[in-house]
Amino acid sequence: MPRRNSRSKSKSKSKSKSKFKRFSEKRRCRFTRMGVEFIDWKDVVTLQRLSTGQGKILGRKRSGTSASFQRKLSTAIKRARFMALLPYVGG
């Protein structure tokens, strides 16, 4: 009885969709698209969208914000936390 290699690849190849989009538009920062110059710490709805349920600030890769707006965003979230508009810890 011949041994079969369990790691061998199957010979039938199926066409699968590519992981990467080749000619898609570049994703831009939401604040740049809207033309925002100042992120208001009193705008709780926007700040909640950019933080997790645990109260952590989303990173640039997940939120899609640019570096300058990410710094402004973190300052605005910290101010809103201090003024008790946002929780430090989710609950």
Image: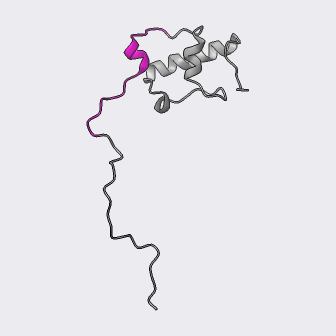
Percent from the top left, x then y, of residue 23? 26, 36
Name the dominant secondary structure of the magenta segment.
loop
Residue 58 position, x and y percent, is 55, 28
Left of 62 or right of it: where is 54?
A: right
**Residue 41 x, y percent position in the rendering:** 58, 10
Q: Residue furthest bottom?
A: 1
Q: Nearer the viewer, residue 72 or 23?
A: 23
Residue beneath the point at 37% across and 16% down: 33
- In the rendered image, which quarter contains the C terminus? top right
Residue 90 found in image quarter: top right
Residue 39 left/right relative to 23: right
Read off the magenta span: 22-38
Q: Nearer the viewer, residue 25 or 41?
A: 25
Q: How many marks?
A: 0
Residue 86's quadrant in the figure? Answer: top right
Image quadrant where residue 47 sits: top right
Q: Residue at x 69, y 13 (%)?
A: 82
Q: Is residue 30 magenta?
A: yes
For image coordinates 42% across by 23% down, the residue present is 66
- As drawn, 84 above or below 27: above
User: What residue appears at the point 44 percent right and 79 percent down from the top-left corner?
Assistant: 5
In this view, 57 is above or below 45: below
Tell me if residue 8 comes above or below residue 41 in the rendering: below
Point out the residue furthest to the left here. Answer: 23
- Residue 48: in magenta span: no
Residue 88, placed above or below residue 23: above
What is the image's colouring? one colour
Q: Is residue 36 left or right of residue 56?
A: left
Q: Position of residue 25 (x, y in %)?
A: 30, 29
